Image (spheres, rainbow, N blue to C red):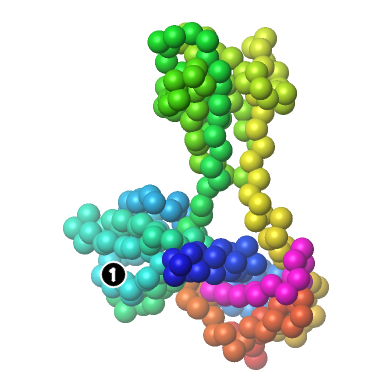
Amino acid sequence: MKADLKHNFYHDLMLSAVLLFSLFVLLNCAHDISIDKPAELIEFRTIEPGTTISINVEDIFFAVSYDLIFSPNQDVHLDYDVIENTIRLAAAEGFSGITYIEFKNNQQSYVWPIIVKEKIPFTFHVSVPEKGVNVFVMGNFNDWNRSSLPMSDDGGDGIFSRTVYLDDGIYQYQFVIGNREIYDPDNPLKTDNGFGYFNSLLQVKSPRKAGIPHLYFLPYRHDHRLRLALDSPRENINVKVTVLKDNAFYPEQFIEINNDEIIIDLQPISGD
């Protein structure tokens, strides 16, 4: 139950607009504020639950020398190989959403935003009358690889199936049965593939996606504050706003949520 509560909590944060900005990107809209060139942006990294990825530190940010110290993070397991200068990341069990890895390099503090994003399971089915043939599903979700996604007839009834985890989007696919390729006979949605045949179409849409709010810049009023409008399809949502300046947390006391408006006070860095 605890893991489920944690999962739902962070999913709500994610889908209720856990709004992360790099402040120097926002400052591009504030033309009257004079600032130095911003530091190199440490970009979001997206990983999937149940997977482990290895990343070279130089792909995250460049430094003349590396002396990294990472703070503990309960949402993402992190192993740092000092010799290889690589990081292995894996999401904690039951977690999805957004989290921030805080670390120091040569005493300089940084924040690395991480998204743990669950994909949507979809199970393909196809009836195969032939006996003893290999059956696969292929599509633009696996670069049309004919053999990377084998299907199985677990029930022995000639119905082959395979579950694939997909992001939101529209996909084209075919089944590979022995030496022949066919579109899905049970799916009426298909498109011309340009080779005298058809590909089946599949639209994948997360049920939570409809509840994701949208964010819009409001006109700048030359008062050292950035304003953004929050348009949410759901009522009574909890919104958490996180702002980064030069890859570090911007003080929360300068961030205000007022009804459907987010106000970021730039006075501390405006020089006035």
Q: What amino acid is found at the position of numbered circle 1 in the picture?
A: Leu
Q: Could you say which quadrant of the image residue 194 lies in?
A: top right
In the rendered image, is residue 60 in sight? yes
Percent position (x, y) of residue 270? 63, 85
Percent position (x, y) of residue 1? 46, 67
Q: With respect to residue 180, does 101 lie above or below?
A: below
Q: Is residue 192 magenta?
A: no
Percent position (x, y) of residue 220? 78, 76
Secondary structure type for disc 1: strand
Q: Which residues are magenta?
A: 227-244
The front one of 37 and 154 is: 154
Dot 1 crowding, Cα within 10 Å, few <14, some 14–19, many 20+ = some
Left or right: where 97 falls relative to 185: left
Q: Which residue is mark 1?
A: 68
Q: With respect to residue 42, does 142 lie above or below?
A: above
Please tell me which residue is depicted at 48% across the width and 8% down the height of the picture. Answer: 130
Q: Is residue 242 magenta?
A: yes
Q: Could you say which quadrant of the image residue 237 lies in?
A: bottom right
Q: With respect to residue 184, does 231 lie above or below?
A: below
Left or right: where 182 falls relative to 146: right
The front one of 61 and 253 is: 253
Q: Quadrant of the C terminus?
A: bottom right
- The outermost residue toward the left is 83
Please tell me which residue is depicted at 56% across the width and 38% down the height of the picture. Answer: 122
